[in-house]
Amino acid sequence: MLNRRHLLAAGAAAALAPSPGLAQGVVTAPGFHHVTVGGLRATIVNDGAAVRPDVTQGFIPNATPDQVTAALRAGGVAEGTALSNPYNVTFIRTPQGLVALDIGTGSSPAMITNMRAAGLDPADVVLIAHTHFHGDHIGGLLNADGSPAFPNAAITVPEGEWAFWNDAGEESRASAMRKPGFANVRRRFAPYAARVTRFAPGAAVAPGITSLPTFGHSPGHVSFLVADGGQQLLVLGDVVTTPLFFVVNPEWYPNLDMDPVASVATRKRVLDQAATDRLAVVGYHFPMPATGRIERAGAGYRLVPANA
């Protein structure tokens, strides 16, 4: 049983859902993937990908270039090959309407095109729930002209993220790399100001969707557990970014993790529980179909894709 003792803050202990049956999925196209979770339907929609030209230099601060090269080779990536970094948004068809978990980069038409191919209408999105506020997760809130891309959607956000990214003191202390993120948060959420609510970790954000505190990658980062009819789907956000690195070596961390100590502890805890409970998982940066299950493998874990 997945319970708060394992995935919520230390000391909490209360069951979130019944015994975890595996969510069932079938790949229907390269740009999207449908998964059923009891009576709910999840659709993972690809929003394109970026390319990391050389991840052996600085991307993983606590691994050597040789270790990173070996991990790439073990993952089937040829030496010297740039690594793709995909973006995937999870949409849940709930009794209250279509709910998005994060909302993409806003940098290309890929997500909207793939949404429509999957039978999803952006006008039907009634709620956008965020894992955290890094730009690739909130950029899709706006059209190129600055207008709301999802005019019928309310927004709900982790209270810790909202507090951090709207704190002038934190902004003043931020590094040059982090500082633009504060202005970007203000700009992306401004047109939705009257429709933004905040939730505490552990709160339900929509029917069948519960937030889980998974801090580290960012100060208020949460994941989402989708549960119905004895089936569960764990939407990880950025607890794990590149699986061939951070599933296999959960003690490694990318230079994007804002609190590496917390992110490593969170990642180990979540992967252990996902493997123990045989949970179906979704990764925002996993290769499509972006879903699968976690298995123990040596000192780490491995991702078994849903279509394997």
Image (tube, rainbow, N blue to C red):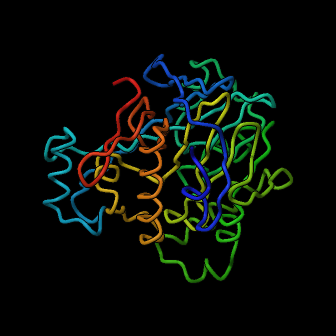
| Residue shown at 42% from the left, 52% from the top | 272
184 on left or right of 153: left
| Residue, far right | 194
| Residue 200 image position (x, y, % from top left) | 73, 60
The quadrant the N terminus occupies is top right
Residue at 37%, 31% (x, y): give it.
Answer: 305
- The residue shown at (35%, 41%) is 295
Q: Residue at x 65, y 50 (%)?
A: 130
In the displayed structure, would residue 298 be above or below residue 94? below
Vertical placement of residue 149 versus 14, above or below = above
Q: Quadrant of residue 150?
A: top right
206 to the left or right of 236: right
Tell me residue 259's x, y (percent): 47, 71
Q: Nearer the viewer, residue 285 or 251?
A: 251
| Left or right of residue 56: residue 185 | right
Q: Nearer the viewer, residue 87 or 27?
A: 27
Q: What is the x, y in percent for residue 215? A: 55, 64
Q: Nearer the viewer, residue 15 or 216?
A: 15
Residue 278 placement: quadrant: top left
* On-image quarter of the C terminus: top left
Eyeballing the image, is 99 above or below 195? above
The front one of 204 and 115 is: 204
The percent position of residue 149, horizontal first and vertical second, equals 70, 39
Q: How many marks?
A: 0
